[in-house]
Image: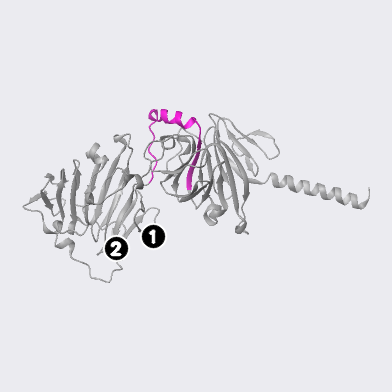
């Protein structure tokens, strides 16, 4: 054999070794396995997976009917693969020395998974993609579920009522209109607060704030509407809405300061006791109604976020001279005000006031001028297109791709166009890739799926380890 032939043979062996090494590039490891989970490598070899097994570039991971796997990739990303899932790791590159070369590409062939992004998704979001036959999911540093449905989701939907798991958190409502500025603070919001415009999303952890010359109207998924007066801080303490189960729906708000005008929706109509507005000096309960409330003096709660006043105008007096305490007036239905001293029913056309938590609420002889001259519109006079703001409220299980965002945002790129999904939103794409729509409420097969509940936020169920 000539030296040239020898060099060619050695070169071929080296290139073959490099190709084999590249095909077996380790991307992560299995943290836990339940049932039968197999992996087929890029070389075609089929193996069963166990805790500690490596996951390599080119691997196709398959979970059987009772199989479940949790995988942690080298950049810290976490994957939870539900039963009957097939996922291929098409590419992975992660380097602290060369972060500009980061790359993570996966392909969902069937089934579903929950993904919590690691450093690749956080420092270079465009480098993390999850592909399917009809769509590409672009990541923006997030936590989301992707599920390919055939007839299996319909079967799970039919069985959803047999399991009682906590509903998944999502968004609570949207902004209808703003005069001036409306800001939101709270979990997931910037430290300085976020400025909200019409159609902006409201989350169950938000605190809404208006300035001295501002007012805003917001609407929630059950149709409840609130108008916020100037100089108001309102916390969304709890909001859950299931259109198919009144017992799983509730709304609780805390008026920290200022005033609001409220019109209750389906929650208040179906279960009046499940809709409340709390203050430092009393709780407002409803019986299917519309009312105004003003909170000043001892009623003001100093806790919660406060945003700097950037207005150059002097602040106006508290809502046209409202007395210090909690004032209410009812313009539709009936409310009651309760505190440590007792409870007072306030029917339609009546007004009441309490200066503190230890003083029994008392009727006022007339509707005070500061309610009659309210700068914020009465919410029942503001038009709202619920179908446009909260499209497709039906519980869907049609075949196709479903993507639900727990946190952050994803870009769903499809032949039918692109859709940005924010925290709490769900998107659907039909099997042909031509029908793309947003679903306001996550389908029950996602809300009740014990395999996609993340340990830090809502815990995997079924004792999976």
The extreme left residue here reads 365
Q: Earlier in the sequence, mark 2 or mark 1?
A: 2
- Is 430 located above or below residue 261 in the figure? above
Residue 369 is situated, as x and y percent measured from the top left of the image, at 11, 58
Can the viewer see residue 325 in this picture?
yes
**Mark 1 burial class by Cα count in 10 Å: few <14, some 14-19, many 20+:** few
Q: Which residue is mark 2?
A: 180
Q: Secondary structure at mark 2?
A: loop
Residue 214 is situated, as x and y percent measured from the top left of the image, at 26, 62
Q: What's the mark number on residue 191? A: 1
Q: CA distance from mark 2 to mark 1?
A: 21 Å
Can the viewer see residue 279 in this picture?
no
Q: Let me know if residue 233 is in the magenta part.
A: no
Residue at left offset 52%, top offset 54%: 122
Q: Is residue 185 left or right of residue 302?
A: right
- Is 325 located above or below residue 386 in the figure? below
Q: Nearer the viewer, mark 2 or mark 1?
A: 2
According to the image, what is the colour scheme of the structure?
Answer: one colour
Magenta extent:
143-170
Residue at left offset 60%, top offset 37%: 61
Q: Secondary structure at mark 1?
A: loop
Q: Is residue 317 left or right of residue 225?
A: left
């Amino acid at each position: 054999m000539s030296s040239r032939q020898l060099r060619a043979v050695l070169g071929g062996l080296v290139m073959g070794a490099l190709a084999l090494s590249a095909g077996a590039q380790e991307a992560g490891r299995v943290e836990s396995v339940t049932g039968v989970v197999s992996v087929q490598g890029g070389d075609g070899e089929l193996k069963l997976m166990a805790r500690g097994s490596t996951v390599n570039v080119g691997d196709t991971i398959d979970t059987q009917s009772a199989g479940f796997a949790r995988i942690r990739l080298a950049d810290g990303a976490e994957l939870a693969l539900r039963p009957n899932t097939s996922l291929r790791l098409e590419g992975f590159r992660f380097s602290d020395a060369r972060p500009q070369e980061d790359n993570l590409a996966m392909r969902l062939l069937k089934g579903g998974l929950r993904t919590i992004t690691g450093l690749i998704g956080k420092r270079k979001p465009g480098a993390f993609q999850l592909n399917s036959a009809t769509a590409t999911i672009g990541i923006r540093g997030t936590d989301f579920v992707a599920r390919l449905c055939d007839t299996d989701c319909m079967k799970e939907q039919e069985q959803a009522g047999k399991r009682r798991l906590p509903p998944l958190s999502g968004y609570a409502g949207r902004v209808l209109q703003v005069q001036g500025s409306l800001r939101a603070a709270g979990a997931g919001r910037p430290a300085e607060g976020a400025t909200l415009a019409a159609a902006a999303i409201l989350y169950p952890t938000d605190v809404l704030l208006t300035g001295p010359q501002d007012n805003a109207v917001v609407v929630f998924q059950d149709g409840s509407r609130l108008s916020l007066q100037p100089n108001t801080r309102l916390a969304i303490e709890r909001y859950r809405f299931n259109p198919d189960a009144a017992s799983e729906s509730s709304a609780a708000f805390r008026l920290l300061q200022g005033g609001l005008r409220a019109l209750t929706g389906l929650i208040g109509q179906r279960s009046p006791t499940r809709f409340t507005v709390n203050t430092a000096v009393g709780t407002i309960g409803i019986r299917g109604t519309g009312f105004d409330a003003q909170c000043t003096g001892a009623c003001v709660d100093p806790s919660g976020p406060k945003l700097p006043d950037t207005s150059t105008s002097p602040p106006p007096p508290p809502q046209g001279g409202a007395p210090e305490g909690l004032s209410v007036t009812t313009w539709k239905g009936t409310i009651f005000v309760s505190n440590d001293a007792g409870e007072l029913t306030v029917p339609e056309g009546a007004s009441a006031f309490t200066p503190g938590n230890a003083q029994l609420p008392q009727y006022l002889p007339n509707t005070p001028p500061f309610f009659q001259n309210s700068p914020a519109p009465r919410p029942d006079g503001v038009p709202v297109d619920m179908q446009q703001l909260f499209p497709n409220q039906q519980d869907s299980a049609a075949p196709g791709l479903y993507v639900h965002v727990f946190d952050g945002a994803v870009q769903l790129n499809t032949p039918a166009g692109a859709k940005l999904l924010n925290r709490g939103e769900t998107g659907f794409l039909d099997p042909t890739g031509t029908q793309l729509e947003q679903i306001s409420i996550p389908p029950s097969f996602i809300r009740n799926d014990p395999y996609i509940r993340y340990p830090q936020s809502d815990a995997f169920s079924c004792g999976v380890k």
